[in-house]
Image (tube, coloured by chain):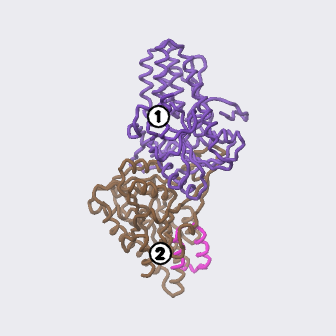
Chain colours: A purple, B brown
Amino acid sequence: MKVKIKNKTKNIRTVWMEKNIIKMIDQRKLPFQLKFFNAKNYNDVAFVIKNMVVRGAPSIGATAVYGIAQAVMQKKNIKNAAKILRKTRPTAHDLFYAIDYMLNEIRSGNDAKTSAERYVEKLVNECKKIGIYGEKLIKNNYKILTHCNAGALATVDYGTALAPIRFAHYNKKKIFVFVDETRPRLQGMLTSWELLNEGIKHRVIADNAAGYFMRQKMIDMVIVGADRIAKNGDFANKIGTYEKAILAKENSIPFYVAAPVSTFDFGLKNGDEIRIEERKEDEVLCIKGKRVAPEKAKAFNPAFDITPKKNVTGYITERGIIRSGEIKKLKSV
Amino acid sequence: MKVKIKNKTKNIRTVWMEKNIIKMIDQRKLPFQLKFFNAKNYNDVAFVIKNMVVRGAPSIGATAVYGIAQAVMQKKNIKNAAKILRKTRPTAHDLFYAIDYMLNEIRSGNDAKTSAERYVEKLVNECKKIGIYGEKLIKNNYKILTHCNAGALATVDYGTALAPIRFAHYNKKKIFVFVDETRPRLQGMLTSWELLNEGIKHRVIADNAAGYFMRQKMIDMVIVGADRIAKNGDFANKIGTYEKAILAKENSIPFYVAAPVSTFDFGLKNGDEIRIEERKEDEVLCIKGKRVAPEKAKAFNPAFDITPKKNVTGYITERGIIRSGEIKKLKSV
């Protein structure tokens, strides 16, 4: 992704490995400071996932494969590393998929570092293809709503929801992005940061305002990412995604989910089987460390919600645009 | 409303007049500090309305009638006072209704202070009746969602949306309130503050989470306030209200609007004729004075949205529960 470092535009990734150190953009410091975090062992890796130094299902998966490769290189107990990494965050399918992939590669006698890099290259390539396929859905002068950050920060490079937007911009289409701020953690600010770096026109809006702009016919399409997609097409994504999907339906606006095929969990019949992470109340009661609620107030803080398949126009994957009825085909390849 | 001052529960109002000083709770300091603001002339009154020291359509109306009465008592130019007050905030009908009422009273030779107090007593009495009528809609063990603050702070006493909730609680019904935090200005924290003072069980949620809880069948009804209601039943209320209405419809949850009859604007055919206030970008880009968006990011910040009448189950007024087809009857009385 393009990043401005000291007035120079560089092309970097969200997470990568140098020797046996896992390096990553510290997303807790964005959008104000570009700082990097070095994860030196699997406890560090568990820390960065749990504390959202790295976030977004595919970036979490990439960090986990590097984490397992690092544990192998450091001759650590791999079973233990896998166990600790599995406990960090429960909703994203990629984390578990990534760990299983690495354990399988190791069992097959493959070099762990090479396997990890292959996983990450595959992911980056998938996002690129999501961009190329998804771009075709975006017409000139389109105004697109996105929720949370399904950008390069969430997927190592390109992004899922942001990949089609990036490619539309590279192909000189005139586009405009409405960016939901995405309370409680305000990941919309990360999306804004990525779009500023790319020079893509956009405005941040309160999550409450998306419906208003839809009703004003100012939004032509919605593209969001996904943390886990059940085999029927129901999917989990950042809290608030369901609200946007229902509002898009009400206003006859196409609603697309951009995700690599690895996000599909064929072991789950439908969305009801997806476990929703409940995060700390303080994410709602405080903002950037500052209390905004009355002293004795309490909160509920589900981090994700489930959007039923019937509200999805299509899934933008590295194999093209898929309708919910076609998901079973993905498994057979 | 009940307020805890130094561990004692007192019953106070949001705004009142002592001699020729208009006193009010400074809502900018809530929910952390209970401070009072003294408005000493009509410029102060314009300041408190514009800067949301006082907020909520009916409380703004009450402040305006006191403001005009004060100008009369201070022998100021009434036309000028009215002109300046009219320019403060454009969406709430009550402000204009209140000023017109006072000018008419003065023209009729009535004592301005007495007329102002009559206006406020009428308002408080209307909210009380909204509470008594609306309470009947709330069954034991109901979980109710509310958006923004349509509480005593917004209406001098009792509230509109919060009045039925207060009376259900007074009548010993077991209830639970989901409080939307209501970005960008977080008026949900004011609602939480009122509910804490009353001892009513509730939790604050991110605006993004309301749909999730509706889909989980954890919400039995929605009650919101209104800033202006067109004669067909379309209404303006805090940004995000439209989103909750559509989500309520999707999940077959009754959606009620609580407002005194003075909120109906019979001069407006429908919601498209209601002017929406666009507020400063910084309300979105900063939270409590702290920047949360990237340095160069921009925002859109509509303060209200329009919810079509078809999404409203009923209007809770001081004359009972009204359906949209019955609104015309209100005018004839």
| B111 in the magenta segment | no
Residue B177 image point, x, y percent: 36, 54
Q: Are marks 1 and 2 in contact (CB under 8 Å)?
A: no
The kind of secondary structure element at disc 2 is loop
Height in image: A71 above or below B3?
above
Which label number is shown at residue A291? none
Residue underneath mark 2: B19
Residue A274 in view of the camera: yes
Write down the chain letter for disc 2: B
Question: Bounds of the magenta span?
Answer: B72-101
Residue B66 image point, x, y percent: 50, 74
Residue type at tag 1? Lys
Write down the chain letter for disc 1: A
| Residue neighbourhood size for the residue with mark 2, other residues' Cα within 10 Å, grouped as few (<14), some (14–19), many (≥20) | few
Viewport quadrant of the C terminus of chain B: bottom left
The foreground one among A306 and A46 is A306
The foreground one among A51 and A258 is A258
Mark 1 to mark 2 CA distance (whole Å): 76 Å
Residue type at tag 2? Lys
Residue A89 image point, x, y percent: 44, 32
| B81 in the magenta segment | yes
What's the residue at 43%, 54% (across, down)?
B250
Please state the total of marks drawn on the protein image.
2
Residue underneath mark 1: A328
Residue B236 image point, x, y percent: 51, 64
Specify whether disc 1 shares its chain with disc 2.
no
Residue B30 in view of the camera: no
